[in-house]
């Protein structure tokens, strides 16, 4: 029961991170001179895009860290279920934990979908899209692997997504 509480708390922390990481409070700026060129604006768009990629990397690495512990707990509980040592309450909690993992992976994939769409539709970021493309597909693969009960492989797929995002970030500097 204590593990379930920790799991629920951990995933509750990660779901709002994606939403908070994609919104930013902007401060008002003084009006610039009318001779401003497009290049500084382009640099600002690329900088904002790089910030979004960095935030996704942070969110994914935290999620992978938590997923490792959760996966181990789920595997142990499944072992107890196979040996008929688990109570109905433990079995119900196991199903709830699996659903939470699935929902969290879906949120990760949706965040990566939004990131890919932004890069594809923004002219200043479009040149980086080819490196970014496939990140959401990697998260979808991880989602499918988790649904099939292969949480370890799911985490490895997410590590590949982190590697792809890191490569994009390096290109943007």
Image: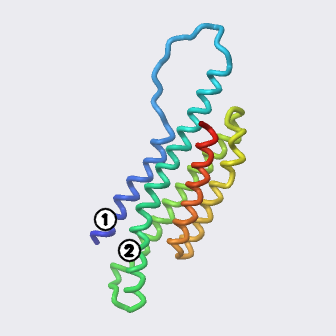
The local crowd at label 2, few if under 14, some if 14 to 19, many if 20 or more residues have their Cα within 10 Å, is some
Dividing the image into 4 quarters, which one contains the C terminus? top right
Q: Quadrant of residue 120?
A: top right
* Horizontal relation, residue 141 to residue 152: left or right: right
Q: Are marks 2 and 1 in contact (CB under 8 Å)?
A: no
Q: Quadrant of residue 20?
A: top left
| Numbered disc 1: secondary structure | helix
C-alpha gap between disc 2 and disc 1: 13 Å
Q: Residue furthest bottom?
A: 83
Q: Which residue is mark 2?
A: 73
Residue placed most toward the observer, 13 or 47: 47
Q: Which residue extends farthest left?
A: 2
Per the image, the residue denoted by label 1 is 5
Q: Residue at x 63, y 55 (%)?
A: 136
Q: Position of residue 89 (x, y in %)?
A: 33, 79
**Height in image: 159 above or below 29?**
below
Q: Position of residue 123 (x, y in %)?
A: 72, 33
Picture coordinates of residue 56, whole percent (x, y): 52, 48
Q: How many marks?
A: 2
Q: Residue at x 66, y 48 (%)?
A: 132
- Among numbered discs 2 and 1, the one appearing first in the sequence: 1
Quarter of the image with the N terminus in it: bottom left
């Amino acid at each position: 029961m204590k593990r379930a509480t920790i799991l629920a708390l951990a995933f509750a922390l990660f779901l709002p991170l994606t939403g908070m990481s994609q919104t930013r409070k902007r401060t008002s700026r003084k009006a610039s001179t009318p001779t401003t060129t497009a290049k500084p604006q382009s640099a600002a768009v690329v900088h904002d895009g790089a910030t979004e990629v960095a935030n996704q990397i942070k969110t994914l690495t935290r999620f992978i860290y938590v997923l490792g512990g959760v996966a181990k707990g789920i595997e142990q509980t499944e072992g107890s279920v196979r040996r008929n040592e688990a109570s109905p309450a433990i079995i119900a909690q196991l199903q709830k934990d699996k659903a939470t993992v699935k929902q969290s992976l879906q949120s990760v994939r949706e965040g990566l979908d939004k990131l890919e769409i932004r890069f594809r539709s923004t002219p200043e970021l479009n040149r980086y899209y080819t490196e970014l493309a496939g990140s959401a597909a990697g998260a979808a693969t991880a989602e499918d692997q988790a649904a099939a009960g292969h949480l370890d492989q799911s985490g490895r797929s997410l590590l590949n997504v982190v590697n792809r995002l890191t490569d994009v970030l390096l290109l943007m500097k």
